[in-house]
Image (spheres, coloured by chain):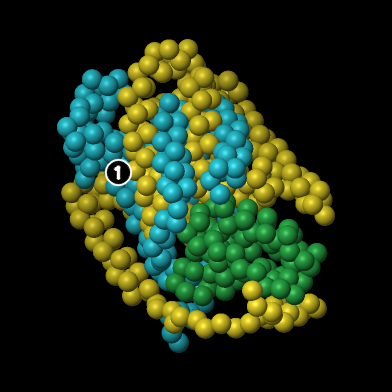
Chain colours: A yellow, B cyan, C green
């Protein structure tokens, strides 16, 4: 611990200088990696266009998650741990925007008498949802990232996340092994509820956006409350 | 002018984006995904397939398991890794993040520091994997896609995920720091 | 005006932030806390948190994927 001179009045901080390693630019490797990823994507698309589509959307998701440091784990953890709700509010915005888009697609399909896409994601609510979400919540905070976050951090070079990905896979296998029991004893007692079936199409959209808006305001208030308490 | 001083390079590749930019772009790609593939984005279901392939590689069999009993699941498992769309998307996420990190010149292999980190990764990974299977997905499939699909399950998932994250934070501070 | 260093290399969220919060609470006003970070998320949320708390903050990329977040405790 060395003594350092600080300027208390201005915003900038001066401190003892230290020697720095010269940084190497990773840009050439990045560009090369980009080209390789695109070529692989094209090869996959030639095999089956669907594989190419998934490959490139996956790449886009990974790129966006990394650049914006978007973290679903932080959105659930930070309000109680640090009192910050910045990420939580961004996640709520994503929920609202995606809901609008999904609503348009689903409503459009239903009006044309087509099967509504993506209904396999409307799953039964049961005690298994409660337990599953709860232990998932514990796990993601301890491991420092959820499924998408772990994949992203593997790409960033975290060795620890490679282990957590491996054990995520093992845990999934374990869960899949026990799934029959859960299905028979717990999940089959639950009911899948698609909000437009209850509130109507317009009603579901209004209810959904209202819930998100209330949570957004609550998150904002929560952050200010924490701040005042600290001050 | 060198590329690294170019303002568009800085904006797109070097600096972190605001969270809200992430929210808008992720939403755009979610809607694109539902429109183009007929299903929203999911991550963790694929990891169960990876588990099945690993298990089969060491001589196990999952044919009798209820989870993999459906025709669709059997076809995916038989088709193999390179023919599974979901697997390609998950690999894409890893490579997309790697590409983003390299383009920002910020890639670094982060070595494991302690046994505590290994314990956290093992326990956290197992909990997430098991939880995702019985809860029908992870933060993407069950939470983000579930809520956006107007499924009540998504909101229920959110409530207990929040509770789990609270307990997880307490455990993390107490045992894993 | 002492200078303290907090090594959070190899640590994932939220550990750098929680450690920085704890350490900063022990410091005197005017002291400097240098948090070493190599996690791209912490490089965003540690400075954001410290700024919100009202401290003077500077973040510098010292190597590929390594940052020093310098926090001057002002209150």
Q: Residue at x 59, y 64 (%)?
A: C6
Q: Quadrant of the C terminus of chain A?
A: bottom right
Q: In the image shown, does A197 or C16 lie closer to the viewer? A: C16
Q: Quadrant of the N terminus of chain A?
A: bottom right
> How busy is the neighbourhood of tag 1: few (under 14 within 10 Å), some, or many (20 plus)?
many
Q: Secondary structure at mark 1?
A: helix
Position of A28 relative to C75 (above/below)? below
Position in image of residue B31 (x %, y %): 46, 44
The tally of labels here is: 1
Q: Is residue A202 visible?
A: no
Answer left or right for A141 relative to B84: right
Position of A17 relative to B173 (above/below)? below
Q: Residue at x 38, y 73 (%)?
A: A26
- Look at mark 1 in the image and give the residue it sits on: B87
Answer left or right for B111 relative to A220: left
Q: Residue at x 67, y 49 (%)?
A: A82
Position in image of residue A96 (x %, y %): 59, 42
Q: In the image shown, does C60 or A49 lie closer to the viewer? A: C60
Position of B97 relative to B62 (above/below)? below
Answer left or right for B78 relative to C71: left
Position in image of residue A141 (x %, y %): 53, 43
- Residue at far front of view: A1
Position of B15 relative to B143 (above/below)? below
Q: In the image shown, does B81 or A6 lie closer to the viewer? A: A6
Q: Which of the chains bears the disc numbered 1? A: B
Q: Is residue A181 visible?
A: yes
Q: Residue at x 76, y 80 (%)?
A: A7
Position in image of residue A81 (x %, y %): 65, 45
């Amino acid at each position: 611990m060395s003594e350092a001179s600080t300027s208390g009045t201005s915003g900038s901080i001066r401190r003892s200088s230290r020697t720095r390693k010269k940084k190497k630019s990773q840009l050439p490797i990045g560009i090369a990696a980009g080209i390789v990823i695109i070529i692989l994507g094209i090869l996959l698309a030639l095999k089956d266009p669907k594989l190419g589509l998934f490959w490139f959307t996956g790449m886009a998701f990974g790129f966006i998650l990394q650049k914006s440091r978007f973290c679903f784990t932080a959105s659930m953890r930070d309000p109680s741990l640090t009192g910050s709700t910045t990420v939580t509010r961004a996640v709520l915005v994503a929920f609202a925007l995606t809901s609008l888009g999904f609503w348009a697609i689903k409503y459009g399909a239903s009006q044309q008498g087509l099967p509504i896409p993506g209904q396999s994601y409307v799953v039964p609510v049961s005690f298994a949802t409660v337990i599953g979400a709860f232990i998932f919540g514990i796990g993601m905070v301890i491991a420092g990232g959820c499924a998408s976050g772990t994949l992203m951090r593997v790409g960033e070079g975290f060795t620890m996340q490679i282990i957590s990905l491996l054990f995520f896979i093992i845990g999934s296998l374990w869960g899949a092994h026990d799934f029959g029991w859960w299905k028979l004893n717990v999940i089959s007692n639950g009911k899948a509820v698609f909000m437009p079936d209850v509130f109507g199409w317009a009603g579901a959209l209004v209810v959904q956006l209202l819930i998100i808006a209330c949570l957004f305001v609550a998150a904002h208030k929560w952050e200010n409350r924490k701040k005042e308490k600290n001050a | 002018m060198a590329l690294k001083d170019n303002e568009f390079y800085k904006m797109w590749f070097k600096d972190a984006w605001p969270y809200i930019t992430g929210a808008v772009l992720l939403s755009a790609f979610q809607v694109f995904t539902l429109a183009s593939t007929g299903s929203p984005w999911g991550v963790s279901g694929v990891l169960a397939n990876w588990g099945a392939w690993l298990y089969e590689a060491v001589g196990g069999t999952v044919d009798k398991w209820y989870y993999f009993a459906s025709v669709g699941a059997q076809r995916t498992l038989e088709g193999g890794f390179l023919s599974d769309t979901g697997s390609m998307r998950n690999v894409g996420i890893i490579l997309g993040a790697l590409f983003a990190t390299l383009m920002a010149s910020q890639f670094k292999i982060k070595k494991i520091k302690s046994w505590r980190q290994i314990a956290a990764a093992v326990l956290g990974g197992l909990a997430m994997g098991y939880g995702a299977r019985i809860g029908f997905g992870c933060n993407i499939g069950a939470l983000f896609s579930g809520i956006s699909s107007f499924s009540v399950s998504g909101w229920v998932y959110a409530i207990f995920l929040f509770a789990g994250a609270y307990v997880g934070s307490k455990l993390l501070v107490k045992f894993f720091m | 005006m002492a200078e303290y260093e907090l090594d959070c290399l190899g640590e994932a969220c939220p550990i750098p932030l929680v450690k920085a919060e704890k350490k900063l609470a022990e410091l005197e006003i005017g002291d400097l806390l240098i948090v070493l970070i190599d996690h791209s998320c912490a490089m965003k949320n540690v400075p954001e948190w410290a700024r919100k708390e009202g401290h003077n903050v500077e973040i510098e990329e010292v190597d590929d994927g390594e940052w020093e977040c310098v926090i001057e405790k002002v209150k």
